[in-house]
Image (spheres, coloured by chain):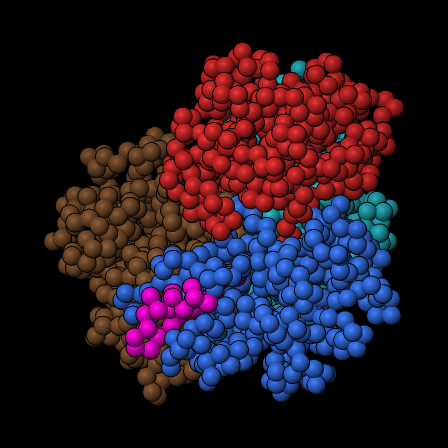
Chain colours: A cyan, B brown, C blue, D red
C-alpha cells in the first residue's frame, strides 16, 4: 500500500534530497511538494538530476490546496518559518517530521535565546519527539510531530549518548571539533557559500556559540543525568556533502579505549544505520557519502592519555533528509530502512 | 532466480563501481572478485564506502579457483591484460563483458597501432559485440563476448550515431571537444592523477591522437556507410566523475537544429537511459552523476551558422560499469534496467 | 615617483585582484578605493588575505571625495553602472581604465542589443581604446579611456588576431570551445555561483549567445578586414581561476600547423606576457594561474585535418585586473610589466 | 651582491616552491638544482608554471658537479635520504637548510623510534638548529645547519610556544586538531594522494601517532621547562595548500582569553610573518595561502570553559619552503623578509 506524503519547502537541498530518496521508495509517494519560488515548475527542472525520475511539480505553499490523501508531511523550511506552519498541519491530523530547529528544544526560552526569536508554538514543544532515531525509536513510532535533529548534533550525539549514559564522559565532558561540507549551509544566497569563497579554504566559525549547541546539551544532560561540559567547534570545509566530528575525551578512571569501544558497539550492535569500527580504526566522510549511515571509530592517544572518537555522516542524509525519512518510515508503520539501503558513491 | 557473476580486476574504480551497482541487484550476485594486489582482503576494506554493503572478499586471479556456479564474468583489467584472460573464460563457457579496449576494434592491425601491442586473440574480434547497448541491443543479447565501449566513445557515439545514420553529418563530420573527470584515468599511480596536479587545473591532452578515436571512427563509418571526418580533443577537468562532449557540426543543406533534434529524439524516444532535452536546452554533468543516463541537448549558433550537440554521461557508469551491467543484464535475459534505476546525487 | 590611483567598485573579485597587484607596485599607490557595501571598512577585512598588506579603507563612491592627488582610476563596476560614472571621471581630467563592458563596443546599437540597455555615453565610444594591450599598445599609451577587454575575448583574441591578420582563418573562421573558472562570474550572489552548484559539475551555457561575442567579432573583423565566422561556446568548470579556449580552425589551402605556429610566434616574439609553445605542445590553466601571462599552443589533427589552438589565461589577471594594470602602466608612462612579474602558484 | 645557492631534490613540491620563491629574490640565485628523475630537463618543463620564469635545468645529484660559487644549499629530499647527503655538504663548507625531518630531533633514539631507521649522522644533531625562525632567530643566523621544522609543528608551535613559556598551558597541555592540504604529502605516488581518493573526502589519520609529534614535544618541553601533555590529531582535507590547527586549552586558574591573547600578541608584536588577530577573531587558510604568514586567533568557549586557539599557515610556504628561505636569508646575512613579501591569491 502506498502512503502519500507532502514536502513543504522542497526546493532547497534537504527538500531535493527528500525527493531523491523518495523516487523509488516502495511505500511512499510524494503527492505534494511546495516551493514559493518555483511554484508551477516541475521539480525535475529545479533539480535537473531528478528529471525523468520524479513527476512532481512544485506547488505554492497553500495548505488549502493540500491533496486529500496526504497522511504526513516533511517540513523543510528555515527555522521560524517552520513553526508558523506546523500547528496547522497537526490540526489537520497530519503527521509531521520537521527538519528545522523549531521543535528540537524543549524549553522555549532556550530556543528564543539561540534563535533570536520568540517561539510561536511553545505548547507543542512537550509533545514533539527529538528524532535521533536510534535513541528515540519507540517515541518516534508513536509521535505526531518529530523534530529532526541538526546535522552536527546527529554526528555528535550518536557518538556521545552511549558514553554519557555509560558514565564515560567524566568531569571533562567532551571537546568536539566538527567539520562540515557546504551543503549544510543550505541553498540560500550567502557570500560565504559562493564557490570562490569556499574552494581551497578551511574556516572555523562560531566556536562555542553555534546554534546547534543547546540541542546537544539538552540531549547529553538527559542521557547523563547531569550537565555535560561541551566545547563545540565547527569548521567549514570545501566539500559538498559530509560531516566529521573528532571528539576528545578524558574519561574517568577505569574507562579506556576498550570500554568506550564496547559501550558504542553494545549500543549499536543491531542498528542498520550506525556502524562502529574496530578499535583503532577511524572512518572518513567518503565512507558514508550518499548513505544514511553514521560510522564511528575510536582510538587512544598514547602521549596525551586522552581518547578520540570520530563520527562521520552525510549531512544531507543521516544529518537531515535520510533521518527524516527513517523517522517517517517508523511513524507510518513501515520498515525503518525502506528507501535508505543504497550504498554511497566512490569516488 | 539469482545468477552468479565474477569480476576480474575488481579493485580499480570500474571494479568498485560494479561492486556498488551489484550490491542490491535483484538477480545478480558477485560470487568471485579478483584483485592481485588485495587478494584475501574484504572488498569493504579496499572500498570503505562498501563496508557493510558487500560480503565479497577479493581472490587471487586464478581461474582454476573460479566457483562452479559462476555464469558470467566482468573483466575490469587494463588493456593487454584483458585479452590474455578472456579466451580462457570463453573456453569455460562463460559469458564475458570486457571493459577494456581489447575487443572493441574489429581490425587487429588498427588495435596494434593504437595500443602499441600486437593482438593476442585476433580470432575473437569478429565475434565480439561492440556493446554500445542502444545501438547493439539484439546482438548483445546473443553475445558471448561483449566489448564494452570506452567512456569518450559512449558519450560521443550516442550523440553522433543517429546523425551519421540520418545523413546529418555532411562533409564536415564533427569536432568533439570532450571533458573528462579524473576517475577515467583509473586508480593506478600516475603523477597526472595526483590531487595537487589536477585540482584547480584544466588540461587538454592527446588532441587528435587519443586511443579512443579509432573506436569512434569504426562505429561512425559503419553507421554513415562512409568515412566520417572526426576531430577529437579530450581535456582533463577537476572533478571525480563526469564526462561532457561538446560536438560541433556543419550539417548539409536542409538540415538544421530542428532536424538534428528530431533525429536524436526519434532514436531514443523509448530508451530508458538516453534522454534528449528540448531543442536549445543543454545538460551538464551534474544531471547524470551516479546514473547510467546519457543526456543530450542541441542548440544552434546564430552567428557562426553551426550546430552544437552536448552529450553528458557519468564516465564510471554509462561510460564503464553501468553500461557493462546493462549489457550483462541483456546477455543473461534479465530486464535491461535491473540495478540501474537509482537517481544521482545532487549536490 | 609614486602615482596615486583610485579603484571604484573595489570589493568584488576584480577589485580585490587590483588591490593585490598594487600592494607592492613600485610606482602606483591606491589612494582611494570605493565600495558601496563596505564603505568605512578596511580592505583587509573584506579581503582577509590582504590584511597587513594594504592600508586602504573603503570609501563610499562619492566623486566629490576623490583625493586631489589621484591621477587615474580603475573602474571595476558592473556594466551599465560603469558608464554612469566614467564621463564624470574623464571630465575631471582623470585617466580611466574601465573593466566593464561599457566602452568595449564601438557601436552603441550593438551594445544595447548585447546588454539590453541603451548606451548612456555613446559619444565616448569613439575615443575609448579597446585595451588588448599587445594589439593596441601605442593607442593605450595615448588613451584617456581604455576599455579593458573581457576575459573570454582576451584568451580568444590573443590566439586569433595574428591568424586573422595573417589570412589564416579562411572561410571557416573559428570554433571556440571556452572553459572558465567561477570567479569570472563575479562576487555577486547568484545560485549558479554557489559552491554546491558548481562543485563536481561542468556546464555549457549561452552557446552562440554570450555577451562577449560581439566584442570578439568587432576585433576580428577589424583584423581580418572582413567578417569572421565565429562559433563561441562557453562552459563553467569547477575551479576558482583560470580560463582555457580550445580553438578549432580549417585554414585555407597552404596554411598548416607550421604556418599558424609561425604567425603566432612572430606576433609575440618580444612580448613579456604572451608566450607561444613549440608546435604540438599545449598549455593548461595551471601554467598561468596567478600571472598576467597568456600561453598559446597549437597542434594538428591528423584524422580530421583541422588545426587546434589552445590559449590559457588567468581570468582575473590577464583576463581582467592584470591587463588593466598593464594598460594603466602604459597610460602613466611606466614600464609595462611593473607589478606583474611574479610567477604563479603551483600546486 | 648575489649569492648562489643550490637545491637538492628540487622536483618535488617543496623544491618547486623554493624555485618559485627564488625567481625574483633580490640577492639569491639558484645555480644548481638536482633531480634524479629529471636530470637534464629544464625546471620550467617539470614545473610548467615556472616556464619563462626560471632558467634552471635540473642536474643529477652528484656533489662533485656542484658549481664552485655555491655558498649554501637547500636539501629538499625525503627523510633518511637527507641525512646521507648533509654531512658531505657541511664538509665542503656549505651552509645547509634541510627541509626533511632528519636533523629536527636532538635525540637520535627518538629519531629512530619515530622514523624506523637508525640515525646516520648523530654527531650533527647537537649543532643543528631547529629553525622555527621566530623562536631561534639568533641561533639560525649563526648556524651552519638548520633543520627546517615540519608543517604541523610550525602551525602548532607558533601558537603554543609563547603559552608554554608564559605558563598558560597548565596540566592539561593541549589538544591539537590539525587539518592539512594534500601537498603536505608530497609529489610521490601514493594511492592516498590521488585526486579521486582525496576529493570530496575528509579523513583523520595517525591520531596520537604522527611522526611530527616528537618534534613538537621536544620544543614544548624546552619552552615550558617540563613535559607538556599533547594530543595531536591530523586530518587530510581536500585542498592543495593550507594547514589549520585548532588548539584546545584548559589554562590554569587566572589565565583566560585576555591573558592568552596578550601572550601571543607580545611575542609576535614585531614579527613580519606572525600576525595575531584581535581576541574573538579567527583566521582561515585562505588568509595565508601563498604567503609566509602564520595567522593566529583565539576565542573562548562560554559553555565548556575552555580556550581555543586557531593557527593557520600555507604548508608549502611557512610550513616548508618559505620558512627555509627565511632561515637562509638570516644565515647569509640578508634581510629576513627578502623574497617573501608578496600577498597571497584570493580567490
Q: Measuring 53% from the left and 46% from the top, which residue is drawn there? A: C346
Position above or below: D48 against C183? above
Residue at the (71%, 29%) spot, across then down? D134
Report whether residue C85 is seen: no
Q: Is residue C20 visible?
A: yes
**x and y percentages locating residue B155 in the rendered image:** 37, 63
In the rendered structure, which segment of residues is drawn in magenta?
C242-267
**Residue C250 painted magenta:** yes
In which quadrant of the rendered view does residue D334 lie? top right
The percent coordinates of residue B321 (x first, y second) are 35, 52
Residue B113 location, quadrant: bottom left
Q: Using the image as rendered, state which of residue C15 and residue C132 is in the foreground.
A: C132
Q: Residue C37 in the image: x percent, y percent?
A: 79, 62
Q: Position of residue C47 (x, y in %)?
A: 72, 52
What residue appears at the point 60 percent right and 34 percent down from the top-left corner? Answer: D325
- Judging depth in this view, the residue of A109 and B130 nearest the camera is B130
Q: Nearer the viewer, residue B295 or A3?
A: B295
Amino acid at each position: 500500500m502506498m502512503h502519500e506524503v507532502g514536502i513543504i519547502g522542497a526546493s532547497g537541498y534537504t527538500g531535493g534530497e527528500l525527493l531523491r530518496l523518495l523516487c523509488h521508495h516502495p511505500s511512499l509517494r510524494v503527492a505534494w511538494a511546495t516551493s514559493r519560488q518555483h511554484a508551477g515548475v516541475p521539480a525535475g527542472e529545479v533539480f535537473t538530476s531528478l528529471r525523468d525520475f520524479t513527476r512532481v511539480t512544485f506547488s505554492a505553499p497553500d495548505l488549502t490546496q493540500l491533496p486529500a490523501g496526504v497522511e504526513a508531511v516533511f517540513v523543510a523550511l528555515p527555522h521560524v518559518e517552520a513553526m508558523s506552519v506546523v500547528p496547522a498541519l497537526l490540526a489537520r491530523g497530519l503527521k509531521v517530521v520537521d527538519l528545522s530547529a523549531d521543535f528540537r528544544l524543549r524549553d522555549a526560552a532556550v530556543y528564543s535565546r539561540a534563535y533570536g526569536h520568540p517561539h510561536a508554538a511553545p505548547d507543542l514543544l512537550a509533545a514533539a519527539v527529538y528524532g535521533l532515531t536510534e535513541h528515540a525509536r519507540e517515541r518516534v513510532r508513536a509521535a505526531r510531530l518529530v523534530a529532526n535533529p541538526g546535522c552536527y548534533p546527529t554526528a555528535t550525539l550518536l557518538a556521545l549518548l552511549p558514553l554519557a549514559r555509560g558514565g564515560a564522559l567524566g568531569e571533562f565532558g567532551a571537546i568536539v571539533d566538527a567539520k562540515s561540507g557546504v551543503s549544510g549551509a543550505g541553498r540560500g544566497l550567502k557570500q560565504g557559500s559562493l564557490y570562490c569563497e569556499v574552494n581551497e579554504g578551511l574556516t572555523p566559525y562560531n566556536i562555542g556559540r553555534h546554534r546547534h549547541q543547546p540541542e546537544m546539551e539538552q540531549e547529553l544532560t538527559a542521557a547523563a543525568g547531569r550537565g555535560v561540559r561541551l566545547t563545540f567547534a565547527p569548521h567549514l570545509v570545501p566539500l559538498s556533502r559530509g560531516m566529521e566530528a573528532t571528539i576528545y575525551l578524558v574519561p574517568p578512571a577505569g574507562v579506556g579505549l576498550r570500554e568506550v569501544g564496547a559501550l558504542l558497539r553494545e549500543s549499536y550492535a543491531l542498528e542498520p544505520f550506525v556502524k562502529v569500527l574496530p578499535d583503532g580504526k577511524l572512518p572518513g566522510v567518503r565512507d558514508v557519502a550518499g548513505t544514511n549511515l553514521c560510522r564511528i571509530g575510536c582510538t587512544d592517544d598514547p602521549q596525551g592519555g586522552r581518547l578520540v572518537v570520530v563520527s562521520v555522516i552525510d549531512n544531507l542524509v543521516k544529518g537531515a533528509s535520510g533521518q527524516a525519512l527513517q523517522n517517517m518510515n517508523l511513524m507510518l508503520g513501515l520498515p525503518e530502512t525502506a528507501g535508505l539501503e543504497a550504498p554511497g558513491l566512490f569516488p
